[in-house]
Image (cartoon, rainbow, N blue to C red):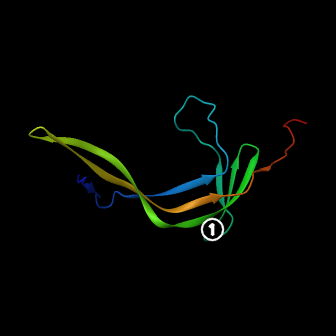
Amino acid sequence: MIIPVMCPEGKVVDWVLVELQGKLENLTDEETSEIGVLLSKDKDGKALQLTIGYHQLEGKRVPLKKPLAILSKSGSTSHAGDTSTSYEVVGVIRDQYLFKTRPRALISKPAGR
């Protein structure tokens, strides 16, 4: 079976894959929410620091050996009883943010004391 993949000019966005050890639990009912603050520790963006609540993770940017494409199903068309599906490229992942180490606990004073 041949599945056509279309790539519109100028609409492809660079995405980044974030790899964490462990799991994140979403305590809200929203599908998307902000999980933390990501900072780069140097000019080229290779050393990273991710702060999630009272936890801080150290990581690095690693280029992927093979880029990954993010596809969106653009629709099915029917030709005399046959259905064909096509996909559209909406993004490309070329880099990975890798956080291998365990999070470090941040200790701060409560406000007003």
> Residue 86: x percent and y percent?
25, 49
Give SS at disc 1. Answer: loop
Left or right of residue 48: residue 77: left
Left or right of residue 90: residue 62: right
Outermost residue on the left side: it is: 80
Q: Residues within 10 Å of mark 1 (few under 14, many from 20)?
A: some
User: Residue 54 appears in which quarter of the rendering?
Assistant: top right
To which residue does mark 1 refer? 46
- Number of dots carrying numbers: 1
Outermost residue on the top side: it is: 29
Q: Give the camera-side residue of 103 and 46.
A: 103
**Residue drawn 12% across the image and 37% down it:** 81
> Residue 18: x percent and y percent?
57, 54
**Residue drawn 27% across the image and 56% down it:** 6
Vertical side of 34 occupied by 1: above or below: below
Outermost residue on the bottom side: it is: 44
Q: Give the camera-side residue of 79 and 94.
A: 79
User: Residue 69 appears in which quarter of the rendering?
Assistant: bottom left
Left or right of residue 77: residue 97: right
In the picture, which quadrant includes the C terminus?
Answer: top right
Outermost residue on the front side: it is: 1
Q: Give the camera-side residue of 46 and 1.
A: 1
Q: Give the camera-side residue of 42 and 22.
A: 22
**Residue drawn 34% across the image and 47% down it:** 72
> Residue 37: x percent and y percent?
65, 50
Amino acid residing under circle 1:
Lys
